[in-house]
Amino acid sequence: MLVFGRLFGVLSLFVSGVYSAGLEIQKQGRVIIVIFISILLISFRLPVDGLSYNTTFTMLYAYSSMFRLTETALAALTIISFLVAAYNTGTAEYRHIALAALLVSLGRTMLIRSDTWLTPLPGIILLAAGTWLFTTRLRRIYLWT
């Protein structure tokens, strides 16, 4: 469930960036189902050691460095796709959304990988600020308010 949740969050942000950059598929359900099934396959096939934990009390799973690299690459592609959307549409709001996606990914990373008691507070602040900025700017674009 942990692997599924981590991948589903990152891929959902990625898909929102791809749609903003110009993907024009009218049936979003197909994209969501493909993401859902692919993440289920990955999370069921990924070996997890339920008896071993790292310093953040996260169960150890195989290919963790490749998993982190995939998350980082998807976050970077999400930010780039929102910047492409800003360039294509000429809307400055997409640049703010790219900044918000960066804040969300940094805050999420700080919360997931924090080893000390000092890191969760800045991670929560970055995640909350990025989420607020992301949702308010997307609302302005799609609801024209």
Image (cartoon, helix red, strand yellow):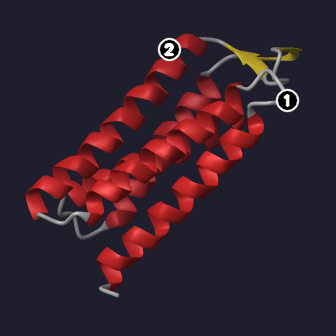
Q: Nearer the viewer, residue 95 or 82?
A: 95
Compared to 21, does 44 lie above or below?
A: above
Q: Secondary structure at mark 2?
A: helix
As drawn, is 59 to the left or to the right of 61? right
- 11 displayed left or right of 111: left
Which quadrant would residue 63 be assigned to in this image? top right
Q: Nearer the viewer, residue 129 or 30?
A: 129
Residue 117 is labelled as 1
Q: Secondary structure at mark 1?
A: loop
Q: Sequence order check: which comes first, mark 2 or mark 1?
A: 2
Report the residue at 69% width, 31% height from top.
112
List x then y, in percent, for residue 42: 54, 29
Going by the numbered disc 1, the residue's amino acid type is Trp
Q: Position of residue 83 (x, y in %)?
A: 23, 48
Q: Quadrant of the C terminus?
A: bottom left
Q: Residues within 10 Å of mark 2 (few under 14, many from 20)?
A: few
